[in-house]
């Protein structure tokens, strides 16, 4: 294959712009055999990586292994999106990944001593679909193909592990529609993707559920959510899309956004990636622009706004844990939900904050080993339990 500098730059730019196909990615990696192209790619990687971890340098990379991992993980459905910065892609694909930390009380580095009685594997595509008549279908234990037919709406599980609705045309009788509410629920350690009757896409995180009609009818498209989900709403100006989450309602016409509404987090958050959404909370309402996140504390009727890195909020659907000065307790709640474990603290809870990214496809021991390297904290992995305790000679203050 003829290689040119112009083609290489075109492929590299398409990769960084998230428009590179898998075939084009193969071509991009074929340039790595030539030293001049490898050097250029390493410079780009180094620039991207320093953006993620200021002051850090990129170690030598096994490019063939990295590319094979990308292709393999995409084939297995482990990574929902290839389009990450090059440095982030490496973090996703390598066996452990990279985390950096900021411990305000303790900077001492230490060797990991994670005690492993029984390692814990990551979660996967697991969910239960409850039909309008009460029938429950365990999707991860069911073969692909049609699952049910509700008055002409065909419900299927695809070969890619998604739940797909092929909606019947509404005949104007809304009575049947209102009686045909389906609920998709993910367990601890589960996630699932859903394509709604209007072709809107929903990624459902662990310990979450979404209820929706098998056919959208009337002036609005209404769904309700418990837990966390990322939405890509199909545009339909005549039929606004509304998500009910606790006391809050999010109204959109067509947009991409994330809602986190776990009771244990003590707040509901809505982050907007694309388009526009309006949040209604009693008599209070706010409209978000892309890159903004709205937060509502439990029991409050106030909506606070702040700018966020949207990738940090949504990268769970791309197979990543991503943290930005995140308290350890919050990190451990995410680990609890994804690995389906109990988290027990022995003694004083740590004043520890974590920044970085790592693949959700790792066993839990690898993530905990990296956190341990901050010093002052040890983990013990038992049977579906993680014990967090003060390290010998370490300090953990709150």
Image (spheres, helix red, strand yellow):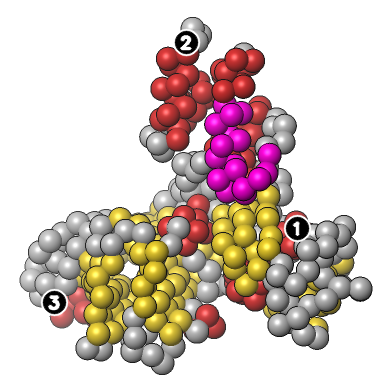
Marks 1/3: CA distance? 54 Å
Q: Is residue 226 visible?
A: no
Disc 1 packing (10 Å; few <14; some 14–19; many ≥20): some
Asked if residue 320 lies left or right of residue 293, the reply is right
**Quarter of the image containing the C terminus?**
bottom right
Q: Residue at x 41, y 74 (%)?
A: 269
Query: Does residue 3 appear in the picture of this structure?
Result: yes
Disc on res. 370: 1
Q: Would you name the residue on which mark 3 appears? A: 174
Furthest residue toward right: 393
Asked whether 241 or 87 is in front, the reply is 87
Q: Mark 2 against mark 3, which lies toward the viewer?
A: 2
Mark pair 2, 1: CA separation: 41 Å
Residue holding disc 2: 4
For residue 73, what is the image quadrant?
Answer: top right
* Mark positioned earlier in the residue sequence (2 or 1): 2
| Structural distance between the alpha carbons of marks 2 and 3 | 61 Å
Q: Position of residue 388 (x, y in %)?
A: 78, 76
Mark 3: few/some/many CA within 10 Å (<14, 14-19, 20+): some
Q: Quadrant of residue 168?
A: bottom left
Residue 44 part of the magenta segment: yes
Q: Is residue 327 above or below residue 155?
A: below
């Amino acid at each position: 294959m003829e290689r040119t500098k112009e083609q290489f730059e075109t492929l590299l730019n398409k990769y960084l712009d998230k428009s590179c196909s898998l075939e084009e990615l193969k071509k991009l990696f074929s340039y790595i055999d030539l030293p001049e192209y490898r050097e250029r790619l390493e410079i780009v990687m180094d620039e991207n990586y320093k953006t993620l971890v200021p002051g850090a340098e990129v170690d030598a990379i096994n490019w063939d292994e990295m590319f094979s991992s990308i292709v393999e993980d995409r084939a297995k459905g482990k990574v929902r999106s290839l389009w990450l910065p090059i440095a982030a892609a490496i973090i996703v694909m390598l066996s452990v990944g990279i985390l950096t930390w900021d411990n305000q009380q303790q900077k001492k580095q230490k060797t990991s001593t994670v005690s492993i009685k029984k390692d814990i594997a990551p979660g996967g595509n697991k969910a239960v679909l409850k039909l309008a008549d009460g029938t429950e279908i365990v999707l991860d234990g069911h073969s692909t193909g049609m699952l049910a037919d509700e008055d002409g709406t065909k419900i299927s599980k695809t070969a890619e592990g998604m739940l797909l609705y092929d909606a019947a045309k509404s005949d104007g009788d809304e009575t049947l529609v209102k009686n045909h509410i389906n609920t998709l629920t993910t367990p601890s350690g589960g996630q699932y993707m859903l394509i709604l009757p209007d072709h809107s896409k929903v990624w459902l995180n662990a310990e979450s559920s979404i209820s929706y009609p098998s056919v959208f009818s009337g002036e609005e498209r209404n769904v309700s959510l418990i837990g966390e989900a990322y939405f890509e709403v199909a545009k339909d100006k005549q039929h606004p899309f509304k998500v009910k989450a606790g006391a809050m309602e999010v109204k959109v016409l067509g947009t991409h956004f994330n809602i986190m509404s776990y009771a244990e987090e003590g707040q509901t958050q809505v982050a907007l990636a694309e388009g526009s959404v309006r949040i209604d909370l009693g008599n209070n309402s706010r409209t978000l622009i892309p890159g903004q996140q709205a937060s509502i504390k439990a029991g409050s009727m106030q909506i606070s706004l702040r700018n966020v890195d949207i990738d940090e909020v949504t990268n769970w659907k791309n197979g990543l844990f991503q943290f930005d000065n995140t308290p350890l307790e919050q990190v451990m709640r995410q680990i609890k939900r994804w690995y389906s474990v109990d988290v027990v603290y022995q003694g004083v809870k740590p004043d520890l904050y974590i920044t970085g990214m790592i693949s959700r496809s790792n066993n839990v021991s690898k993530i905990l080993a990296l956190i341990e390297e901050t010093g002052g904290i040890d983990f013990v992995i038992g049977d579906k339990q993680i014990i967090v305790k003060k390290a010998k000679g370490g300090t953990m203050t709150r």
